[in-house]
Image (spheres, rainbow, N blue to C red):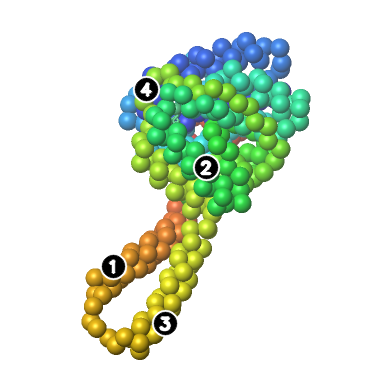
């Protein structure tokens, strides 16, 4: 029998998690009633500070399909997704947010696209961003324009992490052990035949978003440095540009001095030039520093997440590796 693994990353989702489980169970019992398919839920508790873990444990005592992994602290959604994918034992694996912003009712359609239409993976994208601050939507649009110009990998605007994948896609994703993970890029990087399903934005059922504006900006920069080296080229380009400007200026000053003598005026403009050029230099060093920092973190090869406790299938890869 085929199995679908539903990976859910949860950070402070004590309110949303039971609602998610209920809705997902409804979909499992209704939409999947006519086919022979098994389910497993892998809840990844990403170091929640509320009672999320207790809520998940409670669910798992009533339903053998519910498994969980609990991190030793908050490692971020990317780490939670990786842990879930690595632990998933299903033929198909899907990631969903706990807040029901990834609507479970789409799952049957996604499943059919893989099993009947023969796609390897089915992604979803939001076509609207209703309910989100205007400035946030605007910045997101600008970001996608920029990153698609800068990177050879296509990032789809509005693409969610809600994605159903067949086994080979999951294997490809989990084979990438990079520390600085940017899933939207990783999904595109692995390729495979992808079908896109579009839907209108849905607001979260309970709790609050974990993404502040600055967290999103940081994440966007993460995406750029992880999938593009254009900023490095930009700083070289600025260097060349300023050399050229300086060269022209030198010739101009020599000619002027020869023609008109050398009155000691013009220090304010000189001061401006010095400040401006040092600014550009620092900016460029900053860009190089960003890449160096990323390289430093990768080289250290630290684990992407640390598990404090878990309950998984005995045949799951994680449990067989470490004794419980
Ligand atoms: N999440 C997580 N770790 C984090 C932040 C978020 O596992 O450090 C989970 C969160 O519990 C939710 C999903 O990632 O299930 C998406 O987060 P959120 O809804 O806050 O983001 P938004 O939908 O507002 O972009
Ligand atoms: Mg959300």
Residue underneath mark 1: 272
The image shows residue 237 at horizontal and vertical percentages of 49, 66
Residue 207, disc = 4
- Measure the C-alpha gap from mark 2 to mark 1: 35 Å
Ligand 1 shows up in which quadrant of the image? top left
Q: Which residue is mark 2?
A: 144
Please identify the quadrant where the N terminus is shown.
Answer: top right
- State the SS at label 3: helix
Front disc: 2 or 4: 2
Q: Residue at x 68, y 24 (%)?
A: 111
Label 4 CB less than 8 angstroms from ligand 1: yes
In this view, 80 is above or below 19: below
Q: CA distance from mark 4 to mark 1?
A: 51 Å
> To which quarter of the image does residue 159 belong?
top right
Res. 178 in view = no
Instruction: Determine whether, in the image, residue 300 is placed left or right of residue 168.
Output: left
Distance CA(mark 3)–CA(mark 1): 19 Å
How would you rate the neighbour count of disc 1 (Cα within 10 Å): few for under 14, some for 14-19, many for 20 or more?
few
Task: Measuring from the top left, give residue 282's x and y in whole percent.
Answer: 35, 64
Query: As drawn, is 259 to the left or to the right of 30?
Result: left
Whether the residue carrying mark 1 lies under 8 Å from ligand 1 is answered with no
């Amino acid at each position: 029998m085929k199995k679908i693994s539903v990976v859910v990353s949860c950070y402070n989702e004590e309110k949303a998690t039971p609602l998610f489980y209920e809705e997902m169970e409804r979909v499992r019992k209704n939409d999947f009633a006519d086919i022979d398919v098994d389910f497993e839920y892998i809840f990844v508790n990403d170091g929640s500070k509320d009672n999320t873990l207790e809520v998940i444990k409670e669910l798992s005592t009533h339903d053998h399909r519910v498994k969980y992994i609990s991190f030793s602290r908050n490692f971020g959604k990317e780490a939670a997704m990786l842990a879930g994918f690595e632990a998933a034992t299903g033929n198909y694996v899907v990631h969903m947010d706990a807040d029901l912003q990834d609507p479970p009712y789409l799952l049957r359609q996604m499943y059919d696209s893989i099993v009947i239409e023969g796609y390897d993976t089915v992604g979803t994208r939001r076509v609207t961003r209703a309910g989100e601050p205007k400035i946030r939507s605007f910045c997101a649009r600008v970001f996608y324009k920029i990153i698609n110009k800068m990177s050879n990998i296509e990032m789809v605007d509005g693409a969610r992490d809600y994605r159903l994948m067949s086994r080979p896609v999951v294997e490809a994703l989990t084979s990438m052990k990079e520390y600085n993970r940017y899933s939207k890029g990783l999904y595109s990087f692995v390729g495979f035949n992808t079908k896109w399903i579009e839907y209108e934005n849905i607001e979260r059922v309970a709790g609050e978003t974990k993404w502040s504006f600055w967290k999103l900006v940081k994440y966007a920069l993460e995406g750029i440095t992880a999938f593009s080296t254009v900023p490095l080229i930009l700083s070289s380009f600025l260097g060349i540009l300023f050399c050229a400007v300086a060269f022209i200026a030198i010739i101009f000053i020599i000619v002027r001095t020869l023609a008109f003598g050398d009155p000691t005026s013009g220090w304010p403009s000189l001061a401006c030039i010095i400040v401006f050029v040092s600014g550009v230099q620092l900016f460029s060093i900053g860009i190089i520093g960003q890449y160096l920092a990323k390289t430093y973190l990768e080289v250290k090869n630290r684990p992407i997440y640390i598990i404090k406790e878990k309950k998984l299938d005995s045949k799951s890869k994680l449990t067989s590796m470490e004794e419980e």
